[in-house]
Amino acid sequence: MLRLGFVETDESDDDGGDLSLLLYSELVRMPKDELLPFYRSILELNANPLRHGRLAIQEDVVVYMAVVGTGLLDDKLGAALLVNTLVHEADELDDLLIEEFGAQAIGD
């Protein structure tokens, strides 16, 4: 499930800052074994410049997130395409981590 939120960026302007849209999805729980190969895989997946988001680990959960400037939301078709792309990428990534490492899907 992709969640939406807003974050304030560090770059300030006359109003004290800009808001950006945070797209966030919890993918899988960390596997119990083979953590070194798991971490390496996370880093290698993040190195792909064609992905729109990045993987991170929060507590024992792997998350996929992207921060998008709100100016991009003016183009409704472009914004819908970006959200659709992130949903597809998140689904692809959790399937890969489940298959390769036996990670437990969130919600299972």
Image (cartoon, rainbow, N blue to C red):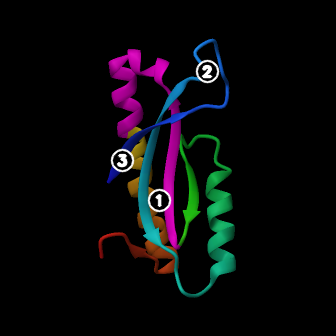
Q: Give the class, few, some or many, for how many residues have Cα within 10 Å of label 2's Cα (few <14, many ≥20).
A: few
User: Which of the two residues, 17 or 20, is positioned nearer the viewer here?
Assistant: 17
Distance between mark 3 and mark 2 Cα atoms = 26 Å
Residue 16 x %, y %:
61, 21
Q: Which quarter of the image is occupied by the C terminus? A: bottom left
Rendering quarter of residue 74: top left
Residue lying at 60% horizontally and 23% vertically, measured from the top left: 17
Describe the element under mark 2 as helix, strand or loop.
loop
Which amino acid type is shown beneath numbered disc 2? Gly
Q: Which residue bears the numbered disc 3?
A: 3
Instruction: Write down the region rendered in magenta.
Output: 60-84
Instruction: Say which mark, if any, is on residue 16.
Output: 2
Q: Earlier in the sequence, mark 3 or mark 2?
A: 3
Q: Which residue bears the numbered disc 1?
A: 93
Reply yes or no: does residue 78 show up in magenta. Answer: yes
User: Which of the two residues, 32 or 9, is positioned nearer the viewer here?
Assistant: 9
- Whether the residues at callouts 3 and 1 have beta carbons within 8 Å, the answer is no
Residue lying at 41% horizontally and 21% vertically, measured from the top left: 73
